[in-house]
Amino acid sequence: MPIRDATPSDAPAIAAIWNPIIRDTVITFNPAQRSPDEIATMITTRQRDGHAFLVAEEGAALLGFASYSQFRAGLGYARTMEHTINLAPEARGLGLGPRLLAALEAHATQAGHHVMVAAITSGNAASIAFHARQGYTHVGTMPQVGWKFGQYHDLTLMQKFLAP
């Protein structure tokens, strides 16, 4: 499964993966689905800013995407990035997540970034275990900071140092 830079023309396929996750789960606290135009702008903006926005595909099917951007605004955080990875249901368990994360980390390292952050819904045990296997360390839990589906959710923060 090749991994390549996303293009704005990938936005509808990315929306088809992302919007069910937004709509149906607490993997993200954001309740607003993303339009293809929004996603196309995000791709262009992140790449313009020197951040990766990648897709994995098999044949004509887009199976997942991954991206990173600055963790928080301000120059003091300019070397700390936060990532997102989402896979189509049929792509889960095939080893694509580690490959996408490794590609993001390589890009961020080459760009001179120092830390990659994973902000994970605390109830998402699979994502926490995935990140631990990839060398991420639990650095904190923020109780009840997310609101979705009529209830509060905790946020687990994990991080990995990118460069020695």
Image (tube, rainbow, N blue to C red):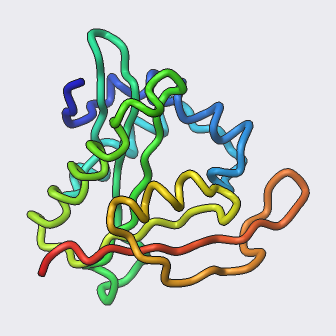
- Residue at left 39%, top 25%? 63
User: How far across and down, in percent of the image, does residue 2 sit?
Assistant: 19, 26
**Count of all numbered marks drawn on residues in the image:** 0
Front-most of 117 and 79? Answer: 117
- Residue at left 65%, top 41%? 22
Outermost residue toward the bottom? 76
- Residue at left 21%, top 33%? 3
Is 59 left or right of 23, judged from the image as shown?
A: left
User: How far across and down, in percent of the image, does residue 52 sit?
Assistant: 25, 50
User: How far across and down, in percent of the image, does residue 144 sit?
Assistant: 77, 75
User: How far across and down, in percent of the image, does residue 153 sit?
Assistant: 76, 66
Is 92 left or right of 140, judged from the image as shown?
A: left
Quadrant (top left, top right, bottom left, bottom right) of the N terminus = top left
- Residue at left 22%, top 78%? 114
Quadrant of residue 125 in the image?
bottom right
Is 32 left or right of 106, judged from the image as shown?
A: right
Front-most of 144 and 15? Answer: 144
Please tell me whether residue 76 is drawn above or below residue 32 in the rendered image. Answer: below
Quadrant of residue 118 in the image?
bottom left
Front-most of 97 and 74? Answer: 97
Outermost residue toward the top? 60
Quadrant (top left, top right, bottom left, bottom right) of the C terminus = bottom left
